[in-house]
Image (spheres, rainbow, N blue to C red):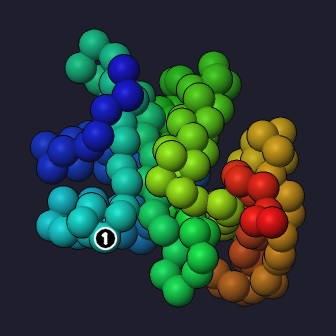
Amino acid sequence: MLRPTTPEDTDALVELTAGTGFFKPLEVETLREVLDDYHGGDADLGHRAFLWEEAGRALGYVYHAPAAMTDRSWYLYWIAVAADQQGRGLGGRLLAFVEQDIRDNGGRLLLIETSSTPHYEPTRRFYLKHGYALAATVPDYYADGDGMVVFSKRLLPPAG
């Protein structure tokens, strides 16, 4: 079942994120801060956070928000699926939900950033499989040898 996150979900989402093996310790720490800010008022700024839960267990989640100073562009900041649930389609269902949620909120473009390291190759393949275009790369963005890869997908047709 997909539902909005609550402050009580934070510990489970941080644990889920750490357990994926994809996020660095600093990113996991940052997630806690992001969720605290979300529940502290960022939701009022249009940020959106949803959790997929079954039998009381968090299996995945998404966090997306409008991009400041743009015309209806959005960012997917977080998407994660529990390690033992990966490869079963939940990530695709979460991503499809995000896309529809953004459309429902008038969004036209979704941007997603990830790492260029070999460890993130499955992540990059996931976005390509779901119709995202490689929009940009920034070498050495996160660290030397760890560039940023930006994917984009148009969610609404161009105006006119």
Q: Taking the image as drawn, is residue 125 in sight?
A: no
Where the N terminus falls, by quadrant? top left
Q: Residues within 10 Å of mark 1 (few under 14, many from 20)?
A: few
For this rendering, which residue is in front, 14 or 145?
Answer: 14
Where the C terminus falls, by quadrant? bottom right
For this rendering, which residue is in front, 73 or 92?
Answer: 73
Q: Position of residue 16 (x, y in %)?
A: 38, 40
In-image side of 53 versus 120 (left or right): left
For this rendering, which residue is in front, 95 or 85?
Answer: 95
Residue 46: image quadrant is bottom left
Residue occupying image coordinates x 85% and y 58%: 133
Q: Find numbered disc 1 in the image and state the secondary structure of the residue it sits on.
A: helix
In-image side of 96 versus 118 (left or right): left
Q: Position of residue 157 (x, y in %)?
A: 78, 55
Amino acid type assigned to the residue bearing label 1 in the image: Leu
For this rendering, which residue is in front, 123 or 84?
Answer: 123
In-image side of 49 versus 56 (left or right): right
In-image side of 39 versus 29 (left or right): left
Q: Position of residue 4 (x, y in %)?
A: 29, 40
Q: Taking the image as drawn, is residue 10 in sight?
A: yes
Residue 151: image quadrant is bottom right
Residue occupying image coordinates x 62% and y 36%: 96
Q: Is residue 55 above or below residue 53?
A: above
The residue identified by callout 1 is 45
Q: Position of residue 55 (x, y in %)?
A: 28, 13
Q: Is residue 28 above or below residue 7?
A: below
Residue occupying image coordinates x 69% and y 85%: 141
Residue 111: image quadrant is bottom right
